[in-house]
Image (tube, coloured by chain):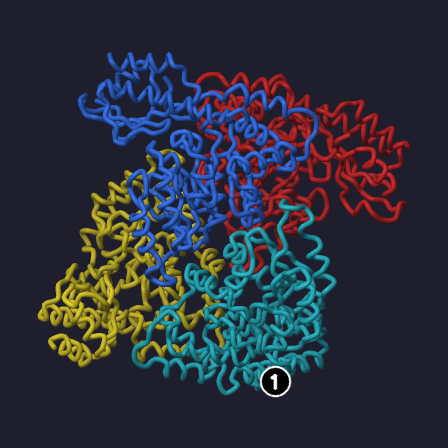
Chain colours: A yellow, B cyan, C blue, D red
Amino acid sequence: MHFASDNSGPVPQQILDALAKANQGYAMGYGADAEMAEVTARIREIFEAPEAAVYLVATGTAANVLALSTLAQPWQTIFCTRPAHILQDECNGPEFFTGGAKLTPVTDADKMTPDALRAAIEGEEVRGVHGPQRGPVSLSQVTELGTVYTVAELEALGAVAREYGLPVHMDGARFANALVSLGCTPAEMTWKAGVDAVSFGGTKNGCLGVEAVIFFDPKHAQEFEYRRKRGAHLFSKHRYLSAQMLAYLSDDLWLNNARAANAKAAQLAEGLRAAGAEFTHEPQANMLFAALPRAQHQALFEAGAVYHLWDGALDGPADDLVTARFVCDWSLPEDRIRAFLALLQG
Amino acid sequence: MHFASDNSGPVPQQILDALAKANQGYAMGYGADAEMAEVTARIREIFEAPEAAVYLVATGTAANVLALSTLAQPWQTIFCTRPAHILQDECNGPEFFTGGAKLTPVTDADKMTPDALRAAIEGEEVRGVHGPQRGPVSLSQVTELGTVYTVAELEALGAVAREYGLPVHMDGARFANALVSLGCTPAEMTWKAGVDAVSFGGTKNGCLGVEAVIFFDPKHAQEFEYRRKRGAHLFSKHRYLSAQMLAYLSDDLWLNNARAANAKAAQLAEGLRAAGAEFTHEPQANMLFAALPRAQHQALFEAGAVYHLWDGALDGPADDLVTARFVCDWSLPEDRIRAFLALLQG
Amino acid sequence: MHFASDNSGPVPQQILDALAKANQGYAMGYGADAEMAEVTARIREIFEAPEAAVYLVATGTAANVLALSTLAQPWQTIFCTRPAHILQDECNGPEFFTGGAKLTPVTDADKMTPDALRAAIEGEEVRGVHGPQRGPVSLSQVTELGTVYTVAELEALGAVAREYGLPVHMDGARFANALVSLGCTPAEMTWKAGVDAVSFGGTKNGCLGVEAVIFFDPKHAQEFEYRRKRGAHLFSKHRYLSAQMLAYLSDDLWLNNARAANAKAAQLAEGLRAAGAEFTHEPQANMLFAALPRAQHQALFEAGAVYHLWDGALDGPADDLVTARFVCDWSLPEDRIRAFLALLQG
Amino acid sequence: MHFASDNSGPVPQQILDALAKANQGYAMGYGADAEMAEVTARIREIFEAPEAAVYLVATGTAANVLALSTLAQPWQTIFCTRPAHILQDECNGPEFFTGGAKLTPVTDADKMTPDALRAAIEGEEVRGVHGPQRGPVSLSQVTELGTVYTVAELEALGAVAREYGLPVHMDGARFANALVSLGCTPAEMTWKAGVDAVSFGGTKNGCLGVEAVIFFDPKHAQEFEYRRKRGAHLFSKHRYLSAQMLAYLSDDLWLNNARAANAKAAQLAEGLRAAGAEFTHEPQANMLFAALPRAQHQALFEAGAVYHLWDGALDGPADDLVTARFVCDWSLPEDRIRAFLALLQG
């Protein structure tokens, strides 16, 4: 009954097997391993992007801050939503890596709309050199509130960005969960919609710790390599990053894991809804935000359920509705979900 | 015949087993895993430092730049040797993470002496606020040229630093190799000699990618946590870092690996010496710098040996002496060393 | 009829005379001039703060970013209002000088209230090391919208900051205008209300370009000196900064200029009000925000008036109300104000 | 008898007059003043560079760090001499403004040679992404040791830089002193020799505090403006910077001041030589490095002479030679030089 995060569960055996397989003999370090060449080829193929520059790092924050610092200038502001991971959960990492760029929240909601993005863009560069200049647009897909931008929505946002000449970054920590939710192609969800760079997550969907950074225009490649190295994010024994990513992309593991996680979340959502929970956002991937009376949270916690309250504390009037976040990963045993739902129904 | 680096070889089975063992059930992320508590306890015990603050990161550069940025102010200069990894091999990472501190090479040699350190310190802060201010001293142990500071040497350098009120950092990417070479205790090689912070390497000595940062004074703890997070070096699935480090420190794996690597290097050195190679520095751990006629390098490379030329190129007059770097890790098969030495003897 | 800014007008003759007087013979540079000792003594006296550390720089932004970077850590966020100069008008200077700190707008209004400040503070540090940590509170006095915090308001905000252990900075680009508006002492408006550091403006109130940074606790002194120097804000011919500041503080020039500016603004406000203008904020110092029909702006601009429209453009429906900013400095000739008001009345 | 620095003396009356003249009426701020347009036109004319981008700042360090940060990437190293102001006297300002670039001393001497520059360049980028990358070349003209690069020397250095595709910056804090020493044109001393950006000093040669930054290729213009603003170096009452620079460039004031300073230094050098002083470098502009017996320094200091000892202290054996730095500015009265020389001759 562990719904705290999709970084809480184990990794599939295929990932461990891949490490063991990569652990043969000697290999050149720092990305010159043979597996990395395969990773690059595979990602280019998956994204239908034969020129794409592809790099691996070990954390999602590293992928985001390195990608954004390659796209942004220190005197610019990055457009994102207020709940965005880059704004809330990276301890000023984007500001640090960009050398001082700002982040402008376009909206307090899960998704930005073209109108809201346009208004935010128009709200900057109104004071000449005095204020921050307009910089990249960063979109979280899956959003931080468990919803998924449609392809049409992405295209519309990409069009606004393009109109102002601004690059678009996608924080795809849950890229696969969004992709299988939409049923589109990786190309449709990214460069065809105007996305320039992707943080392509592996960690939350079954890897130990590996994320790809993908630039569809290889002009960013050299700069990114310097930024990764000086950011201390270039692995010497790089083959163990490559091996994870390669296994992740093989035999549809990434898609199957995402489908499993989404399905478990749907099962959980159905049970929560049946139990009377209210959803602030319609769950579309593997993450739910559901409001329950405080007393139910107290009972669930006592019974050993693990998840985060999103607003409000555990103590207080028993009947108050308190929203909680529930995240499912590929590994969650169905019987534990059923056990949780049974608890819920009292 | 792969002597390119101690990041080229495989990891021992114990490390993979530890990952598999850690891969059970659900765990809280970001260092709140149960294994990390064990790691901290174990390192405190090994270092006889019950108050020490202990953190894990995945690269040696991360350990160095995060430790140094915790000890240094942006307007200071860090004293190191010219060959130091932080000066040569981190792509301005220390400058980036410290917010602009300088690095002052105390000496071109492998080791700094107390006199050279004192002279370098005295050479700074001679222009009031105009020049850089004196900052931390950073010592590489094993040095970048394969030698090892004795405990007495470390104590003497620590005394000079203390005299000026400067903190001391040890880049211990090859900490275990130095330790078994000296036969002293970790405490003797660090805090008893005046070292304040250690980059305690695991990656070069048998891990996939894990390094500990150790502060003997826990006052640095909170600041380090913020620096690690905003540097994008805090792992969500942290248990896989912890598991590696725990296995590394169990059953003397770290010491045995280091002893094996040093012994192989000694064997290699003996063979090289017998073949007439000249050593610029007496090898004391697992890294050799030996000069051979260019023609021998050419023959060895053609036969499949892998190592780095340290000065000069592969092309040129056949008789010229060219220095090469040979690094041994724990895994190098003895028969490959013998095969290499056989090649060497023609 | 120039109301664009209080940086648009000339400086009083006393300032030029002071430069001429300082321009005698030889002086040591970089703040070691005799005039600077007088400046420090004078400011300590004015502020009843015999221990205060006092420094001069040449721009208001320099005063702000250097003061804030001395008070804030890179992983913190600075609490200010949304209209604050540090947020809107310093091109990410605070982010640059702090090494990546964020700015959190407490309110969209001109002034923050204790409740709003408390709510903003409580809204941070809710995610452990993941989000930004709580940092300094920065208050603009005069506010960016022409209002003035009362001493009681400052005390209440200072109390909230103190409760959380957060330092307080005052952006006093228009310090004197606020002071004479309140009729209190400098000490009451600053350290007695909990302010730790002040950007004490001279430029907008009659100097060529000089601002003092004042820390009431001298523990910040040494760090500030390094920050000023590496920020390239330490003047070699420092005596010309000192001379300006000394003249500014002599014979009540600073207070008289501020009184004159405020009086002119009051006169202008009265005329505008008589002409039907609406004020979004009650003007309390030397800056007004008044709404007039667009046609009136068009007529005024055509007649040669100079000021900034604050929202909306010059083109559009003639009857729409458009808010403009009018700023008065000490030098504005009364007849020009009367001429402007005459124009206004058509 | 004040030879401490060329920032110690007064400014000529023309500069004060220009401030008074500029102090008329109202002007738009931040560089939009009418005087600035004249400054730009004048500098373009003087440099025969009709496309040049021209900006004003108030300190020489600001000019250097802003120019260099526009030319350098954070992962690069800047090639300069060891005595260079940017290395010794800017408190890590270049590292701060560039976001962490290194400085590589090409030589310990006053001037770099093409061979030394080539060797230094070849010494970098030998480790792929691991080490710093090659960045701009920065030349001090006048050098920090009082010598002047010939045009041929500059051309030769420019050719080496161009060969490697590296931009060239000139720290011209004493630009005019070098120019009149060489008797060449500003164009010959800069862009015709391969210089891309100049810190064109005014402060040391008679201004209160103003330096121009000149880029011969205007592609750098926009970026520089953002860097200047976020560095807090954009003046609101910019007309007082413009006025200084305009007066400085009018009626050959800049050239006449430099000629006067150089002539005084020559007179001083002649006297020192006659008194037996030894010069480590042949003085070519307005700065001398002369060795005298310690007893003579003691006598001169007692008699009220002001200058800096360059190596060694005032206390010690009377007969030891101690090198001192003597700097002459335009204003030094001849009778004070004669008085000093009289003292010298005992």
Residue B220 is left or right of residue C88, and the answer is right
Q: Which of the chains bears the disc numbered 1?
A: B
Q: Does residue C244 show up?
A: yes
Q: Nearer the viewer, residue C171 or D117?
A: C171
Q: Quadrant of residue B217?
A: bottom right
How many marks can you see? 1
Query: In the image, residue A83 lies at what x, y percent?
Result: 27, 55
Q: Residues within 10 Å of mark 1 (few under 14, many from 20)?
A: some
Q: Residue at x 72, y 61 (%)?
A: B116
Which residue sits at x=75%, y=33%?
D3
Q: Closest to the observer: B220 or D111?
A: B220
Q: Secondary structure at mark 1?
A: helix
Task: Locate the C terminus of chain B and report the quarter of the image it occupies.
Answer: bottom right
The answer to whether any part of residue A329 appears in the image is no
Where is the N terminus of chain B found, in terms of image quarters? bottom right
Percent across and percent down for residue D154 are 66, 37
Q: Quadrant of residue A178?
A: bottom left
Q: Nearer the viewer, residue A332 or C239?
A: C239
Amino acid type at circle 1 is Arg
Residue B260, image x, y percentages: 58, 84
Between C18 and D275, the one nearer to me in the picture? C18
Q: Is residue C286 left or right of residue B297?
A: left
Question: Label 1 belongs to which residue?
Answer: B338
Above or below, B44 against C88 in this view is: below
The location of residue C312, given as percent across then percent down, is 25, 29
D82 shown above or below C38: below
Would residue D8 appear left or right of A343 to someone viewing this image? right
